Every structure is written in C-alpha cells, then in structure tokens.
Amino acid sequence: MSKQDRKYQVLFVCTGNTCRSPMAAGLLKAKLPPHLKDEVNVVSAGTLGLEGQPATPNAVQVAGERGADISDHVSQGVTEELIAESDIIFCMAQEHRDYILERFPAYRDNVFLLRDFAAKTKLDDPDIFDPIGSSIGVYRECIRLIESELDRILPYLVDLIEQRDVHR
C-alpha cells in the first residue's frame, strides 16, 4: 500500500518511548480536529529500542490532566519500517534526529525537531528535556512545553494533512 492509500502518519521519537514521545502522541491525538481524527495515525517510538514498556506513571498522570489518555501505551523501538511508513517525524531532541538521519538517511526530508518545525526563529537549544525519574512537577513542565509546541504547529500540520488528502 502506498503512502497515498493509507492514513497520514505522524511519528514522535524520544529515547525510551515511555515519557516524552507518548505524551506528545497522546496530546496530538486529543488535539486533532474532529474531521481528521480518522485520517491520521499518531504513533511514537524510542531510539533505545525498549519494547513492551508502559508509559511512566507520571507521564500517564500529566497527560490525563491535559485530556490525553496514554494509559495503554506500549513502548517500541525505532525501525526502518516505522520511519518509512511515517509522513512526518518529530524528534524530542537533536540526538534523536541524529540517530534517525544516521541510520535512515533516505527519510531526512521527513525528520524534524518538534521545536524547530515551522519555527520563525531557531532556538539555541531546541531539545525538549527528558523528565524520566523526575517529580510530577518536572513532568508537568515537560508536557507544558510539548503542548505549547503542538499548539504552535497544529495549523501547519493540519494543512499538510489536508493537502495530501486533496492530492490522493
């Protein structure tokens, strides 16, 4: 099945796939306009290759506080198949983008740092910090940062998805 024949896929990538990327994926699913919810597949993965782990309890709690249920999340590692199936890939930190570009250079045009995507100015440090092992307050700060970036990019992302649907 070609990319044109299936749902638009958004992939979020972090390290362990138990905090940042599942929170980002859960929030995006909750924020997608109703007319796109059935047209978009939102997934997440980690560069460590952890398989079968749940999201951390703090990640589940803070995502829930913001209207996203990630309680059934199961971690997975980044694979070439997952990269190839994704229309756009958002990395939480430069190390994740570097990992993908080094291993899967053919997909470089689809790989972005979340905080750099469609940004009017580039940040000196565009990484979203890893809250693993931290207090609930640190998780709340992390998800606040992720949510503000998702709110900023959502109009651009909706345009990309709708443009693809027009060209099917």
Image (tube, helix red, strand yellow):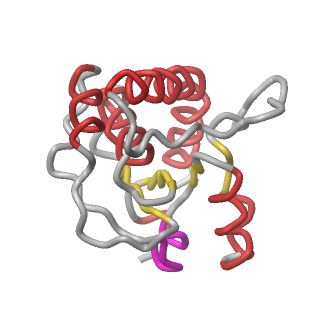
Q: Left or right of 120: which side holds 30? A: left
Q: Left or right of 167: which side holds 7? A: left
Which quadrant does the N terminus fall into?
bottom left
Please state the extent of the stretch shown in magenta in the rendering.
78-85
Asked if residue 64 is among those painted magenta in the image, a careful observer would answer no
Q: Left or right of 72: which side holds 51? A: right
Q: Position of residue 38 (x, y in %)?
A: 27, 44
Quadrant location of residue 49?
A: bottom left
The residue that appears at 53% across and 20% down in the rendered structure is: 148
Q: Judge whether residue 75 can be spotted in this image.
A: yes
The residue that appears at 37% across and 49% down in the rendered structure is: 42
Q: Is residue 2 above or below residue 16?
A: below
Q: Position of residue 153 (x, y in %)?
A: 59, 28
Q: Left or right of 89: which side holds 140? A: left
The single residue placed furthest to the left in the displayed view is 72
Q: Position of residue 111 (x, y in %)?
A: 67, 56
Dominant SS in magenta: helix
**43 or 72, nearer to the observer:** 72
Q: Judge whether residue 40 can be spotted in this image.
A: no
Number of numbered markers: 0
Q: Is residue 65 above or below residue 57?
A: above
**115 or 118, nearer to the observer:** 115
Q: Position of residue 146 (x, y in %)?
A: 50, 30
The residue that appears at 36% across and 71% down in the rendered structure is: 50
The residue that appears at 66% across and 68% down in the rendered structure is: 99
